[in-house]
């Protein structure tokens, strides 16, 4: 099919380990040939699971910034990163309040999900294998990572696609959840090379890294363990459009994404100080 994204070259696959290659090929096959499987899984099983972990704890603001987009629009959701489950909070909201839940991809570090025997199983169970494409954290894997970025751009060329990205590139383990890490420029590159795409910032807070704890908190005193999801207006990158091959522009676009997320963190604090009630 001519509208499917280009496949990696042999030299790009050669830098992967055998397990990474096998995991990638499985995810790639499902994305190309069986996309309905992930759509069905995420709209049913994952919706139930995220409800069980979050439904009584969610506080959502700025929903109109998400609801304004139609089924043919293409978005990059950029969010801060504190927990393994940040984007599961976000997807719980997207599935309920947006038509843009079918073609969702989450570029992810290759650690565990692609280099551990159980990684593909967990990826399949938690996202229908949509934690894809992987970014491999080895210098020798640069050629493959170039492909991964190009693949993100190619996926965003198709109507109705959402890409969920943590610009920080890794979890922020510092004591202050409002002090964000510096953005990696990859998100800026994707945003500028994917034509016609809107970049929507999201601030998330409240999830742990323990899935069992998430379920317990949702049923035992959920008011003590709120999950915050704050959407903002699209990041303005108009003056950078047309500079998709300029690393300086990538860096500036990434910085603007982080500034927008940081501003939403400040807004979240203000809303809490004003008595932001559960379920809003």
Image: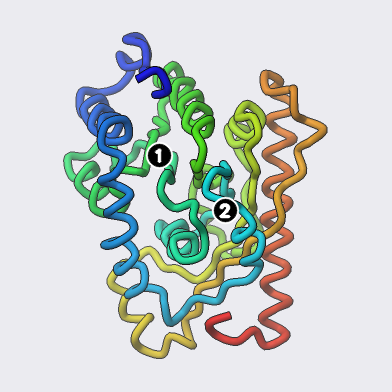
Query: Could you tell me which quadrant the C terminus lies in?
Result: bottom right
Query: Could you tell me which quadrant the N terminus lies in?
Result: top left
Q: Which mark is residue 167?
A: none
Where is residue 219 shown, x and y percent of the image?
A: 34, 85
- Give the label, 1 or 2, closer to the camera: 2
| Residue where numbered disc 2 is placed | 79
Residue 148 found in image quarter: top left
> In this rendering, is residue 262 above or below 141?
below
Where is residue 215 shown, x and y percent of the image?
A: 31, 76
Q: Residues within 10 Å of mark 1 (few under 14, many from 20)?
A: some
Q: Marks 1 and 2, Cα distance to the nearest angstrom?
A: 15 Å
Specify the farthest residue to the right: 239
Q: Which mark is residue 109?
A: 1
Residue drawn where x is 58% and y is 44% of the image: 73
Residue 56 found in image quarter: bottom left
> In this rendering, is residue 24 above or below 175?
above
Tag 2's secondary structure? strand
Where is residue 46 shown, x and y percent of the image?
A: 31, 61
- Whether residue 2 sits left or right of residue 146 in the image: it is left
Tags 1 and 2 touching, CB below 8 Å: no
Task: Tell me which numbered mark, 1 or 2, is placed earlier along the sequence.
Answer: 2
Residue drawn where x is 49% and y is 26% of the image: 154
Residue drawn where x is 46% and y is 66% of the image: 96
User: Which of 24/206 is in front?
Assistant: 24
Q: Residues within 10 Å of mark 2 (few under 14, many from 20)?
A: many
Whether residue 178 is visible, yes or no, is yes
Tag 1's secondary structure? strand
Where is residue 54 shown, x and y percent of the image?
A: 41, 74
């Amino acid at each position: 099919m001519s509208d499917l994204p280009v496949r990696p070259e042999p030299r790009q696959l050669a830098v992967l380990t055998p397990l990474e290659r096998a995991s990638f090929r499985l995810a790639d096959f499902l994305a190309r040939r069986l996309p309905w499987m992930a759509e069905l899984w995420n709209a049913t099983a994952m919706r139930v699971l995220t409800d069980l972990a979050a439904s009584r704890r969610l506080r959502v603001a700025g929903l109109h910034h998400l609801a304004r987009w139609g089924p043919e629009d293409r978005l990059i959701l950029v969010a801060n990163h504190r927990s393994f489950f940040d984007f599961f909070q976000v997807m719980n909201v997207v599935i309920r309040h947006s038509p843009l839940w079918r073609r969702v991809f989450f570029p992810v570090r290759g650690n565990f999900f692609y280099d551990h025997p159980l990684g593909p199983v967990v990826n399949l169970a938690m996202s229908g294998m949509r934690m894809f494409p992987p970014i491999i954290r080895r210098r020798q894997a640069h050629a493959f990572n170039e492909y991964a970025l190009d693949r993100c751009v190619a996926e965003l060329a198709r109507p109705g696609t959402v890409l969920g990205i943590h610009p920080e590139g890794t979890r922020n383990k510092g004591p202050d959840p409002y002090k964000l890490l510096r953005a990696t420029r990859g998100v800026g590159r994707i945003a500028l090379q994917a034509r016609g795409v809107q970049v929507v910032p999201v601030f998330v807070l409240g999830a742990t890294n323990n899935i069992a704890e998430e379920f317990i908190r949702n049923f035992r005193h959920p008011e003590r363990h709120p999950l915050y999801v704050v959407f903002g207006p699209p990041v303005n990158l108009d003056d950078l459009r047309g500079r998709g091959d300029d690393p300086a522009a990538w860096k500036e676009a990434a910085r603007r994404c982080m500034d927008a997320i940081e501003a939403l963190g400040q807004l979240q604090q203000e809303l809490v100080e004003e008595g932001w009630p559960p379920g809003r």
